């Protein structure tokens, strides 16, 4: 039930990350200790989570198992499909706190915020 309520009682002692289950926190802790037990045999990149490793392998195989139901485009990552679906819906869930401009991707608003801080002048 913690997932549905948003409750995250398990706090990482090394950063601000909080989790709804201890098992999620254990997986997260691997990022701090460098425990990367999943290694790609094709490029030697290592991963701490099996799910990240499986997603990575799609890059080598060219597999794109996630298909848009609106235009038949396919993607190798679920997150890429979610971002793509926003092009159809027009959803822009990320709003700039400085000027109110909305963005469909978190990376876009981060890049935009640099215009307010002077880090990137565009």
Image (tube, grey):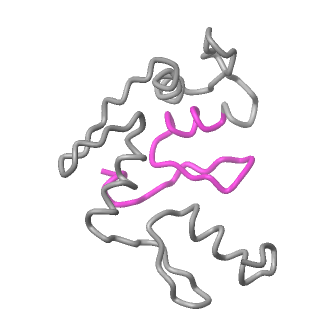
Can you say whether 3 is above or below 48 in the image? below
- Closer to the camera in the image, 34 or 3: 34
Could you tell me residue 70's position as x and y percent?
18, 52
Q: 19 or 68, which is in the foreground?
A: 68
The residue lying at 51 percent from left, 48 percent from top is 19
Q: Position of residue 55 (x, y in %)?
A: 47, 28
Q: Nearer the viewer, residue 118 or 4?
A: 118
Relative placement, left or right, of 50 versus 1 is right
Residue placed furthest toward the left: 69
Task: Identify the residue at image location x=57%, y=52%.
Answer: 18
Q: Examine the structure image and report whether residue 28 is included in the region drawn in magenta.
A: yes
Residue at figure coordinates x 42%, y 38% from the top left = 77
Region in magenta: 1-29
Which quadrant would the C terminus be assigned to in this image?
bottom right
Horizontal side, residue 57 vs residue 37: left or right: left
Q: Is 17 or 101 nearer to us in this picture?
A: 101
Q: Position of residue 14 (x, y in %)?
A: 75, 47
Identify the image quadrant of residue 96: bottom right
60 with respect to 7 (left or right): right
Identify the residue at the far right of this view.
Answer: 119
């Amino acid at each position: 039930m913690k997932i549905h309520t948003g409750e995250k009682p398990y706090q990482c002692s090394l950063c601000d990350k909080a989790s709804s289950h201890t098992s999620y926190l254990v997986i997260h802790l691997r990022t701090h200790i460098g425990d990367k037990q999943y290694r790609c045999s094709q490029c030697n990149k290592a991963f701490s989570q099996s799910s990240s490793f499986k997603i990575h392998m799609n890059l080598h195989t060219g597999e794109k198992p996630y298909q848009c139901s609106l235009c038949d485009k396919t993607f190798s990552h679920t997150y890429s499909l979610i971002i793509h679906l926003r092009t159809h819906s027009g959803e822009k869930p990320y709003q700039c706190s400085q000027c109110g401009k909305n963005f469909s991707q978190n990376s876009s608003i981060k890049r935009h915020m640099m215009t307010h801080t002077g880090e990137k002048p565009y």
